[in-house]
Image: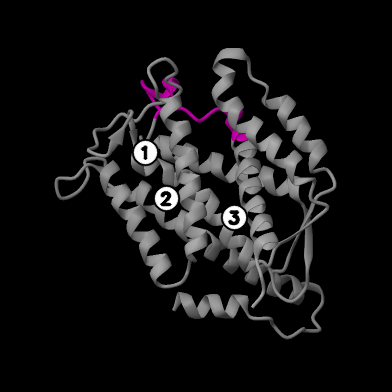
């Protein structure tokens, strides 16, 4: 069923001479369906996060069950060709990048947040399922790129984009020692992507949006998901140990910067693949 939906969404539709509210309704419907489809892994994973009993099931802790669930969904998506092997490789990269950040942040000298529950699959204090939270962001962006036939106009030089992305990632670690430079990096990203436009196709016509706006919007929805996750006690910040409180809105900026880094990885991989690909 989902394979048929993918075929329908990826097919080139016949141009329709619609205008006004009919055009808006049609494109909005297709946009919504494509967004929901792009969120397939993220949606299933976070649904499991919210629905999994805190005490686990069948004698297994919930963190371990979440890892099993995430792996099973990934295997299913590749087996049913809802996700390609190349896309799976990219998602594994996001998992590794996310796990490295998590391991540092929960370490004894930092303790930016913690995972309070027991799990057999904890490594360095981090349950292995946590990397899939970062992989879910990458999965969404990869799927959206394909479903919306994304094209990037006025992309900055790749070496500049990669440099800013590396500095953003490094700042998540170094700000504990030499100061937080996120706003300087955000200013660099603002200048770098000021002219960049993402072209996407909800139905039969191309639409455009500033890429910076996409970064901010995706970061906002991740921040909302983080609030829900901490409410359910998946992880906790120090100020939430006594009673839950909303995640500080400043985390929105952190997530938006992480989205920039994620986008840069995907765009870079696609750029490299296009350069080394030899047509049959």
Residue that label 3 marks: 141
**As drawn, is 174 to the left or to the right of 79?**
right
User: Measured from the top left, where is residue 69 in percent x and y?
Assistant: 32, 54
Per the model, the C-alpha gap separating discs 2 and 1 is: 11 Å
The residue singled out by tag 2 in the image is 46
What residue appears at the point 50 percent right and 81 percent down from the top-left corner? 4
- Name the secondary structure under disc 2: helix
Spatial separation of the CA atoms under disc 3 and disc 2: 16 Å
Q: Position of residue 133 (x, y in %)?
A: 45, 45
Of the numbered discs 3 and 2, the one sitting upstream in the chain is: 2
* Other residues around mark 1 within 10 Å, as few (<14) / some (14–19) / many (≥20): some
- Residue located at (83% from left, 43% from top): 194
Quadrant of image for the C terminus: bottom right
- Tag nearer the camera, 3 or 1: 3
Q: Is residue 189 visible?
A: yes
From the viewer's side, name the closer residue of 174 and 116.
Answer: 174
**CB within 8 Å, label 3 to label 1:** no
């Amino acid at each position: 069923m989902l394979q048929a939906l993918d075929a329908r969404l990826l097919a080139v539709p016949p141009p329709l001479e619609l205008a006004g509210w009919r055009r808006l309704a049609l494109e909005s419907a297709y946009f919504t369906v494509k967004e929901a489809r792009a969120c397939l892994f993220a949606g299933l994973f976070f649904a499991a996060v919210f629905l999994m009993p805190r005490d686990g099931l069948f004698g297994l802790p919930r963190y371990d069950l979440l890892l099993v669930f995430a792996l099973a969904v990934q295997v299913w998506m590749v087996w049913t060709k809802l996700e390609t092997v190349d896309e799976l490789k990219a998602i594994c990269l996001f998992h590794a990048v996310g796990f490295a950040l998590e391991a540092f942040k929960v370490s004894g000298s930092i303790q930016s947040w913690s995972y309070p529950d027991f799990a057999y699959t904890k490594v360095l204090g981090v349950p292995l399922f946590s990397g899939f939270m970062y992989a879910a962001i990458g999965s969404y962006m990869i799927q959206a790129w394909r479903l919306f036939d994304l094209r990037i106009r006025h992309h900055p030089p790749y070496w500049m984009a990669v440099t800013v992305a590396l500095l953003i990632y490094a700042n998540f670690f170094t700000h504990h020692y030499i100061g937080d430079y996120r706003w300087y990096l955000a200013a660099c990203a603002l200048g770098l992507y000021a002219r960049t436009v993402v072209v996407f196709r909800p139905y039969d016509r191309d639409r455009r949006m500033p890429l910076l706006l996409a970064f901010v919007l995706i970061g906002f929805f991740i921040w909302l998901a983080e609030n829900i996750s901490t409410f359910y006690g998946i992880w906790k910040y120090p100020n939430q140990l006594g009673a839950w409180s909303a995640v500080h809105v400043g985390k929105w900026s952190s997530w938006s910067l992480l989205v920039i880094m994620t986008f840069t990885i995907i765009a870079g991989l696609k750029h490299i693949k296009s350069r080394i690909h030899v047509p049959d």
